[in-house]
Image: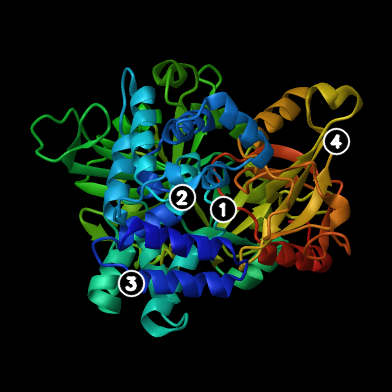
Amino acid sequence: MKFKKFAEYLSRIEKTTSRLEITRILAELFKKASADEIDQIIYLSLGNLRPKFEGVEFNMAEKMMLRAAAGAANILVRDLEARYKAIGDLGELIFGLKKQVFGDKGLTVGQVYQRLFDTAIDEGTGSQDRKINKMIELLKQLDQLSARYVLRIPVNNLRLGFSEMTVLDALSWMERGDKSLREDLERAFNVCADIGKIARIFKIQGLRGVSGIKAEIGVPIRPARAERLPSAEKIVEKLKVFAVEGKWDGLRVQIHYDKGRYMLLGGQEDLFGDKGQKKLVRIFSRNLENMTEMFPDIMKACESLGVKSVILDGEAVAFDPETGKLLSFQETITRKRKYGVGEKVAKMPIKVFVYDLLFLDGEMVMGKTFRERRKLLEKIFHQKTIGALILADQEIVADSKRLRELMFEYLKQGLEGVMCKKLSTAYQAGSRNFNWVKLKKATEGGLVDTIDCVVMGYYLGKGKRTGFGIGAFLVGVQDEKGNIGSIAKIGTGLTDEQWLELKTKCQKLDFNSKLKPDNYLVNKGLYPDVWVRPELIVEILADEITKSPVHGFGLALRFPRLIDFRDDKNIGEATSREELEKMFRIQKNKTGSG
């Protein structure tokens, strides 16, 4: 497919806000794409070059892209900067330049993709200038419309408004003309979180090929998630007999280990096995980000597990090496870094509380019951502690009194609460259901849990906060159609440091437009001064959820306050509209304190 034709599809998508219409356009695009290019088309449509867990990033800031655009158009950067400040979008900026600047050379999707990939992986001394020059040469060979989208991709600002879930819908539409295959496709995506690979197999082999997809070491599995219930009594009523574990406030980690494969020192797999320095280990976050090189202490522990291959699910929590005390999430998150890792390991070591097993010695074990998976885990952990890895404590419970006692014990240890798990169920990747139920300490007369919201925009500061450039921020939740509705405007409860951190994070996500994004449901009286892309997740505690005629989905948070920035989560991991409505019903019907 010519890239120009691909760009025309992207333009059609950008012009509609209808979720169904976007799905149909994508289905048409996928149908016309060849099996050799459908994965590249999907990655590019999502603003990427590879699955997120592979960590292929452009590392090109907007200023670099401005230099590339100026070089391609043969005009001064400062002249282009003035126009950019007025327009606020690199794509529109280059689209508005004179047509004769561009020379359409008829490049294919594959050719453009390869050149973008070569640009992204260029590293070392002088790489910034080389990247800019590569972009200049590419832009000169593209028509205006193609250049619009090629400029937006490196700065993660395609503005197309759809996710991997929409891609799954579109693949079903491509084959059947409806969403009837969505469930089968999502099941495959849940155990192999590479949407391009799923699409390529589906294009070649159809449903039969997708149904045969299994978990593999090095490709993350979408994690199972827990539901909520308001009290110990309700949990016993729902689960009958169940396992109880602590609920830590740390980093969710999925650990992959293969004794028979090796990594080079830079973390890449050594395919020949003769130059390898370390056994193959991959550590993924809850939103499938590759964090392997940040946790050498976890990598080292894996080599003592006594297995050929394994995928573990657990929670990483930093601790004070002098006192042994577990540290907060905000302190633990500082272990996520590219530089100074060794120094941080010594000052802030990690404990990983392992609570589930997904894969063992070449076999996917997610289909086994939790009771069976736990027995296998206990065989692996013949000692409770193996380096940084610790087998999570567990007790079988059948009455609310004992559940409350365990809850109190874990709270005294500094944990968030407890996790209750059915013994007879399989591990359901990517699903949130009542196989797992969490119970956290409730505020007095208030919510049974915090809410993970997405920041939609912010308001400029007044008085003391004038210097911060921010005085309040708007948060919301997303519905199943991709709309984001506001639920709270928050202007108090943050420290000066938090306000400054919030402003810094928001600036990186600025839409650079005064226009409200089409999928943002916000009352005009609540419009912020600055709209931001829905990528910053914050953990919010409130006294209660109330009905509201003002906010997007008819619900609002009463007395909301910021608890943490959840850099480990994306919008798909945040609280949804459906979950918020469930929490509202739980709050109304709460019969016990939990």
Give coordinates of residue 562: x percent, y percent.
75, 39
Nearest to the observer: residue 155 or residue 441: 155
- SS assignment at label 4: loop
Q: Earlier in the sequence, mark 4 or mark 2?
A: 2
Q: Residue at x 49, y 65 (%)?
A: 165
Residues at circles 3 and 4 in contact by the CB criterion of under 8 Å: no
Which residue bears the numbered disc 3? Answer: 32
- Determine the image quadrant of residue 584: bottom right
Give coordinates of residue 397: x percent, y percent.
56, 60
Which residue bears the numbered disc 2? Answer: 144
- SS assignment at label 3: helix
Q: Disc 2 marks which amino acid?
A: Gln
Q: Disc 3 marks which amino acid?
A: Lys
Is any atom of residue 354 visible in this view? no
Nearest to the observer: residue 376 or residue 106: 106
Q: Residue at x 65, y 56 (%)?
A: 575
Which residue bears the numbered disc 4? Answer: 492
